[in-house]
Image (cartoon, grey):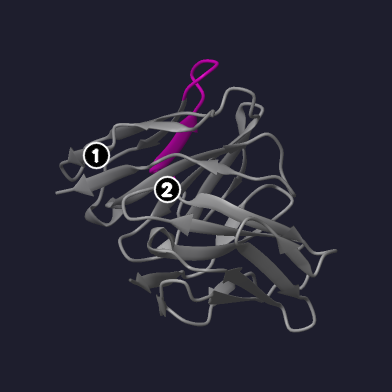
Amino acid sequence: GESVGLHLPTLSVQEGDNSIINCAYSNSASDYFIWYKQESGKGPQFIIDIRSNMDKRQGQRVTVLLNKTVKHLSLQIAATQPGDSAVYFCAERNQGGKLIFGQGTELSVKP
Amino acid sequence: EPEVTQTPSHQVTQMGQEVILRCVPISNHLYFYWYRQILGQKVEFLVSFYNNEISEKSEIFDDQFSVERPDGSNFTLKIRSTKLEDSAMYFCASSPGTGNTEAFFGQGTRLTVV
């Protein structure tokens, strides 16, 4: 069946440290993945995406890694800031556009 | 920057009443979606809509729910005879295409059924 899940429900990091948020997916046919950030009371906000023909993609302070062998995604945030505090979801998108979200990891940044 | 807008931001309704949640997708987008998020849980897909018809729906999207694009700009979700368990955040999303393209989300409508 289809499922996308996250390994850890909470992550606490010190300001300035790097953060790594992990995600596992089960559908080996998945070919497009997105990381979303959700702040309290707001809708999911796109952070970065990656296609299955890539292993790594970098954005501004964020990097997504894809390991298709073990069906694992990770989001790395460099020099984490208080404004990065939020819940982070990975999502798999099917060809029809439907997003299947993981459970979410709450990132807390300590000043 | 174009954005998806949703109204109202918060809706309180009595059990058994009908509610209509409204969304204005980004103007040049062709694919529209509704998702819901029960407090503290993950975001769940409800329905996708393209070319004036439903293209995919989840098990959650039963006969109690319906969607409509009544004009060129609005996209609505109607919930008939609301139940307590319908209380959740409802998010509208739109995208220019499917597959490997980003979906943009609105800020959500918090529905509280009492």
Q: What residue type is labelled 1?
A: His
In the rendered image, the residue lying farthest to the top is B71
- Please identify, in this view, whether the residue under mark 1 or under mark 2 is nearer the observer: 2
User: Is A55 rendered above or below residue B33?
Assistant: below
Q: Is B80 covered by the magenta stretch? A: no
Q: Indicate the quadrant containing the N terminus of chain B: top left, top right, bottom left or bottom right.
A: top right
Please give left or right for residue B114 compared with residue A59 in the image: left
Question: Mark 2: which secondary structure?
Answer: loop
Instruction: Answer yes or no: are tags 1 and 2 on the same subunit.
Output: no
**Residue toward you, A5 or B68:** A5
Residue pictured at 53% horizontal, 45% vertical: B47
The Cα–Cα distance between marks 1 and 2, rounded to whole angstroms, is: 14 Å
Q: Give the range drawn in magenta.
A: B63-74
Q: Which residue is drawn at 56% across and 50% down?
A: A46
B90 over B59 or under it: above or below: above
Question: On the picture, is B26 further left or further right than B14?
Answer: right
Label 1 belongs to which residue?
A: B10
Q: How crowded is mark 1: few (under 14 residues within 10 Å), some or many (20 or more)?
A: some
Q: Mark 2 points at which residue?
A: A43
Q: Position of residue B66 (x, y in %)?
A: 45, 36
Residue at x 18%, y 40% (from the top left corner): B13
Subunit that carries the residue with mark 2: A
- Is residue B80 or residue B2 the one in the foreground? B2
